[in-house]
Image (spheres, rainbow, N blue to C red):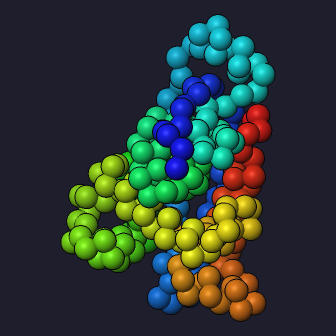
């Protein structure tokens, strides 16, 4: 794994998030609706006036970026870029591309550490308590409390561990757009939704939109916004 990636701070022009439909996953799935914060990435406090160099970058259309060991970058909103150090540390600890973790934080909570979804998902990466407990159990740890899941570092640790497990299973040959789409289906819909989709059933609308949004952001790495 490459040494910790660096962060380039520029102003952000939002791609816009996909509004999530109510969860429609099959019974027993982990489908959850991303929080309202994630649905509105531009709803943040006004940024201070940029320095001359930043103003020039803004004029060229550049966005804030979280480094990636692949050499590409993912432009993210300020609220997400503010957690870049923690995202990179947690991702690299689990052998995960930081861009993948960053796009999940963007889609799930838009960088709001206290985010809660109607289905009960919590924190930056909107971990479902049952999923977090399963991840912790596989690591020989006790199930995290709600307070722990709202702790940014603990949430990122468990979320990146979960993503790394999905990547190992669904992207054994590396991350590309198709692999990221599969990971997104599993992360949002859960294993049952993934299995049924792979057998030819259509995805629940929320999961379909979520997976499309994740792939779009992944494929946009390295591009100006």
Residue for point 33% across, 76% down: 138
* Image spot of residue 117 (x, y percent): 44, 63
Q: Outermost residue, top direction?
A: 52
* Image spot of residue 75 (x, y percent): 65, 39
Residue for point 72% across, 14% down: 56
* Image spot of residue 59 (x, y percent): 76, 19
* Residue 153 higher or lower than 170, as above or below: above
Residue 18 is at least partly visible in this image: yes
Residue 22 is at least partly visible in this image: no
* Residue 124 higher or lower than 41, as above or below: below
Please state the total of marks drawn on the protein image: 0
**Figure quadrant of the C terminus:** top right
Quarter of the image holding residue 68? top right
Left or right: where does residue 133 sit relative to residue 186?
Answer: left
**Of residues 136 and 121, which is closer to you in this image?**
136
Left or right: where does residue 134 sit relative to residue 225?
Answer: left
**Of residues 218 and 4, which is closer to you in this image?**
4
* Image spot of residue 69 (x, y percent): 60, 45
Left or right: where does residue 167 sit relative to residue 85?
Answer: right
* Residue 157 higher or lower than 66, as above or below: below
Residue for point 50% across, 65% down: 164
* Residue 52 higher or lower than 29, as above or below: above
Residue for point 47% across, 52% down: 91
**Of residues 169 and 114, which is closer to you in this image?**
169
Left or right: where does residue 161 sit relative to residue 49?
Answer: left
């Amino acid at each position: 794994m490459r040494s910790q990636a660096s962060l380039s701070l520029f102003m952000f022009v939002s791609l816009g998030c996909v509004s999530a439909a109510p969860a429609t996953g099959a019974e027993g799935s982990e489908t959850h609706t991303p929080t309202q914060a994630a649905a509105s990435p531009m709803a943040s406090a006004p940024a201070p006036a940029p320095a001359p160099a930043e103003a020039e970058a803004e004029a060229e259309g550049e966005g804030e970026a979280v480094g990636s060991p692949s050499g590409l970058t993912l432009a993210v909103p300020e609220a997400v870029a503010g957690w870049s150090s923690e995202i990179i540390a947690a991702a690299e600890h689990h052998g995960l591309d930081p861009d993948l973790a960053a796009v999940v934080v963007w889609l799930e909570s838009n960088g709001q550490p206290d985010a809660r979804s109607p289905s009960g998902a919590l924190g930056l990466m909107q971990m479902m308590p049952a999923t977090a407990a399963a991840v912790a159990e596989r690591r020989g740890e006790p199930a995290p409390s709600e307070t722990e899941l709202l702790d940014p570092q603990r949430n990122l640790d468990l979320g990146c561990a979960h993503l790394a497990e999905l990547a190992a299973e669904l992207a054994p040959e590396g991350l590309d757009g198709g692999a990221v789409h599969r990971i997104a289906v599993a992360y949002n819909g859960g294993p049952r939704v993934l299995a049924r989709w792979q057998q030819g059933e259509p995805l629940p609308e929320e999961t379909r939109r979520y997976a499309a949004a994740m792939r779009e952001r992944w494929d946009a790495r390295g591009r100006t916004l």
